[in-house]
Image (cartoon, rainbow, N blue to C red):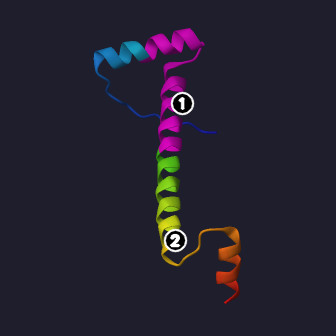
Amino acid sequence: MKAVKKTVSLPPDLARAAEQIARAEGKTLSGVVQDALRDARATRLREELQGLQGYWSRKAKEQGILSEEDLERYLRT
């Protein structure tokens, strides 16, 4: 994988915390930032999925679909 270099600015307390994490985990500062961004992306995707599930769950209930059997009957019609 080819890395793309970017410059980011961090407040001093956050920079110190990131450096402490890097030392404690034996990682580079870049590795810590990459992990944090991956975690943030995963959280955002999880929240988006939950929102979609909630939306479609409400739509199903509006149609009287409360179980897998209800869904199968609905799909057959």
Which residue appears at 55% of the width and 9% of the height? Answer: 24
Q: Nearer the viewer, mark 2 or mark 1?
A: 2
Q: Residue at x 49, y 20 (%)?
A: 29
- At 71% from the left and 77% from the top, the residue drawn is 72
The numbered disc on residue 61 is: 2
Please name the amino acid that badge 2 sits on: Lys
What segment is highlighted magenta in the picture? 18-43
Residue 77 visible to an observer of this rendering:
yes
User: Residue lying furthest left in this view?
Assistant: 11
Where in the figure is residue 75, as x and y percent of width and height? 67, 82
Please give the residue where the numbered disc 1 appears in the rendered image: 35
* Residue at far bottom of view: 77
Q: Which quarter of the figure is the N terminus placed in?
A: top right
Residue 36 falls within the magenta-colored stretch: yes
Q: What SS does tag 1 mark?
A: helix
x, y percent for residue 43: 49, 42
Amino acid type at mark 1:
Asp
Q: Is residue 4 visible?
A: no
